[in-house]
Image (cartoon, grey):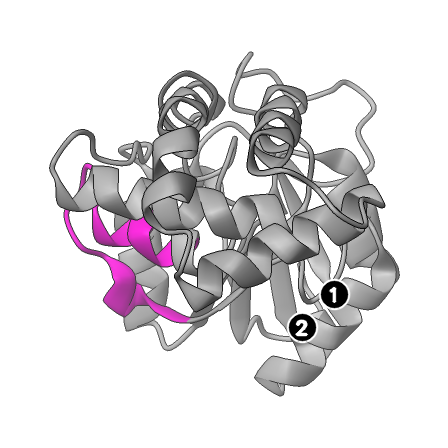
Amino acid sequence: MSQAMIRAILTDIEGTTSSISFVKETLFPYARRRLPAFIETHADDTTVRHWLHEAAKEAGIVSAEKNEIIALLQRWIDEDRKSTALKALQGLIWEEGYRNGEYTAHVYPDAVPALEKWKKQGVDLYVYSSGSIAAQKLFFGFCDAGDVTALFSGYFDTETGPKRERISYERIAHAIGVAPDQVLFLSDVVEELDAARAAGMRTTLLARAPATCPTHGTHPCVTHFSAIEVP
């Protein structure tokens, strides 16, 4: 990282700032379990109806019964489908769990201190996750470290574009007004890092579990945030 100075850091959540197990073992089951009652009690909510319509459209369903849509969404949860409609509905359901104190979001102990340090250095911080922007804000608003949303200057989800496509990172760089080579992207997924690098961004792989960097990796690799050097 000896070229341009880093002006912005873009970070993934799951597997990067936070454990995959929290999402898989806490958030997904909670959303799956609460989905039928949530849709039943929010049937007249404009936002919910919009995302149910988008889910049906994505599945190619012209007309669907409520139970059919519920079954579809539960199957997508089981498959971890990267559906913008599903992620939006999950975020709405998770909000109830966060606000009711049923859980707090997991964040690795090394993540927040590093983010705070970079913020104090004048580096703008952004989040890019497959979870909806609303879900991202809830995640960092109700996490183990408290409410850390003030650290971030913005959030991006799959409405910007798929995380494994170059165009998504080009759009993000344009949106934040920073040259791609002045943006550092952090993720645990090599294909995402490949796409970011193709867009001109700098990259670092977080090897969380198992905490071992690949022998012949194509991206700089660390096992914890404190090992990341930001010029």
For numbered disc 2, what is the local secondary structure? helix
Look at 60% across and 16% down and name the residue there.
212
List x then y, in percent, for residue 42. Answer: 36, 51
Question: Disc 2 marks which amino acid?
Answer: Ile
Instruction: Say if residue 199 shows up in the picture.
Output: no
**Front residue of this view, candidates 158 and 65:** 65
Q: Is mark 2 in CB contact (under 8 Å) with mark 1?
A: yes
Look at 43% across and 73% down and name the residue there.
123
Look at 42% across and 52% down and name the residue there.
43
Question: What's drawn in magenta, residue-wise?
Answer: 136-153
**Front residue of this view, candidates 13 and 64:** 64
Q: Which residue is mark 2?
A: 172
Quadrant position of residue 80: top right
Up-down: is 225 above or below 158?
above
List x then y, in percent, for residue 231. Answer: 52, 65
Tell me: 221 left or right of 94: right
Tell me the crowding category of disc 2: few under 14, some 14 to 19, or many 20 or more residues within 10 angstroms, Cα based.
many
Up-down: is 104 above or below 166?
above
Quadrant position of residue 181: bottom right
Q: Which residue is mark 1?
A: 169
Tell me the crowding category of disc 1: few under 14, some 14 to 19, or many 20 or more residues within 10 angstroms, Cα based.
many
Q: Is residue 148 magenta?
A: yes
